[in-house]
Amino acid sequence: MRHNKGYRKLSRNSSQRRAMLRNMVTSLIDHGRITTTVARAKELRCIADRMMTLAKRGDLASRRRALAYIMRKDSVYKLFDEMAAGYQERQGGYTRILKVGRRHGDAAPMAIIEFVEPSVAADATTE
């Protein structure tokens, strides 16, 4: 039975899994959307939402925690200084997963994970 299993192992040991997810969240921040398998996208969603929550908090301790996880400093600056302002009103659900079919080589289910649009509509209604 699979009761209370908190994460997917993704056929890797813990250090490889952590490195893969760190690279993926860095790429997601840099590009805004990436294509990967559905299982990896579901694991990445938790981490990306946690990083956006840290960015919304915006204090020094949160920035250091993000720097400890995200691979590049430029990505952290982009997350904290550019992206976080658009998600201040949102209480969660910063990413979406769109299923796009199966990969040709091994028929693995593929998905696009991307950040949802920042809340520009909230700014337009206040004018």
Image (spheres, rainbow, N blue to C red):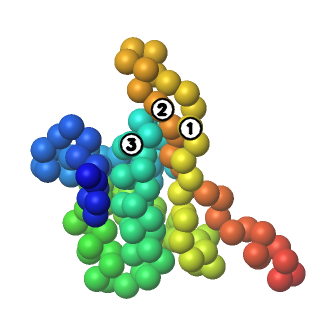
Query: Which residue is labeled 3 in the image?
Result: 39
State whether residue 60 is above or below residue 66.
below
For this orientation, the residue located farthest to the top is 105
**Which mark is first along the chain, 3 or 2?**
3
Label 1 sits on a secondary structure element that is strand
Residue at mark 3 to residue at mark 1: CA–CA distance: 11 Å
- What's under tag 3, amino acid-wise? Ala
Label 3 sits on a secondary structure element that is helix
Q: Residue 124: which quarter of the image?
A: bottom right
- The residue depicted at 42 percent of the width and 46 percent of the height is 41
Residue at mark 1 to residue at mark 2: CA–CA distance: 6 Å
Residue 88 drawn at (x, y percent): 58, 78
Q: Crowding at label 3, few (<14), some or many (≥20) Cα neighbours within 10 Å?
A: some
State whether residue 113 is above or below residue 71.
above
- The residue depicted at 41 percent of the width and 26 percent of the height is 108
Q: Which image quarter is the C terminus in?
A: bottom right
Residue at mark 2 to residue at mark 3: CA–CA distance: 9 Å
Query: Which residue is labeled 1 in the image?
Result: 99
Residue 126 drawn at (x, y percent): 83, 83
Is 88 displayed left or right of 55 in the figure? right
Query: Which residue is labeled 2 in the image?
Result: 110
Q: Crowding at label 2, few (<14), some or many (≥20) Cα neighbours within 10 Å?
A: many
Q: How many marks?
A: 3
Instruction: Say whether marks 1 and 2 touch (CB < 8 Å).
Output: yes
